[in-house]
Amino acid sequence: MVPLIAALVPVLGSVLDRLIPDSAEAAKAKAELELRLVDAANQAALAQVEVNKTEAATGSLFIGGWRPFIGWVCGAALAAQYVAGPLLEWAAAAAGHPVPPLPKLDDMLWELILAMLGVAGLRTVEKMRGVAR
C-alpha cells in the first residue's frame, strides 16, 4: 500500500498545482492530501492486523492452522533437501546401488525459511518483553 501512496502523491500534487494557483494554498492542500492518504493506509493495515489476530486465535485447523502448516512444510523441505536426500544418496552409493541425484528444490527455500525465522524471532522478543498476549 505504501508504494501506491508514494506513487500517487506526486501525481495528485501536480493536479493540485494546476487547480490551486496560490502556492501556499497548494502546499497546504498537498500536506492535507498526504495526511489523508497515510491515514487511509494505516487504517487498512490495522484492519489486516485485526484479521490476523482473529485467524491466529481460532482453534479451527482450517482457519488458524495455515501458519503451523507452512512452518512444517518448510521444515520438511529443508530436511529433505539438506539431510535426508544427501544421506539417501550416500547410503545407496555405499550399498553399491548409486541413484541419480535427487531433484533440487528452488534456492528461494532459504529466503522463505529465514523470513519465517525472523518473524518467529520477533515473536520471541515480544514474549520476552512481556507484550505478547
Image (tube, rainbow, N blue to C red):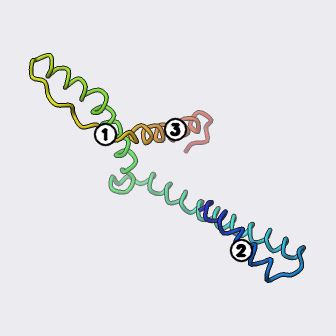
Which amino acid, mark 3?
A: Gly
- Tag 1 residue: 105
Q: Position of residue 69 (x, y in %)?
A: 34, 46
Which amino acid, mark 1?
A: Leu
Label 3 crowding class (10 Å Cα cut-off): few <14, some 14-19, many 20+?
few
**Label 1 vs 2, first from the N-terminus:** 2
- Tag 3 residue: 118
- Secondary structure beneath dot 1 equals loop
When asked about the image quadrant of residue 85, the answer is: top left
User: At 84% from the left edge and 71% from the top edge, which residue is drawn?
Assistant: 27
Which amino acid, mark 2?
A: Leu
- Tag 2 residue: 12
Label 1 crowding class (10 Å Cα cut-off): few <14, some 14-19, many 20+?
few
User: At 44% from the left edge and 56% from the top edge, which residue is drawn?
Assistant: 55
Q: Which of marks 1 and 3 is in front?
A: 1
Quarter containing the N terminus = bottom right
For residue 75, above or below residue 56:
above
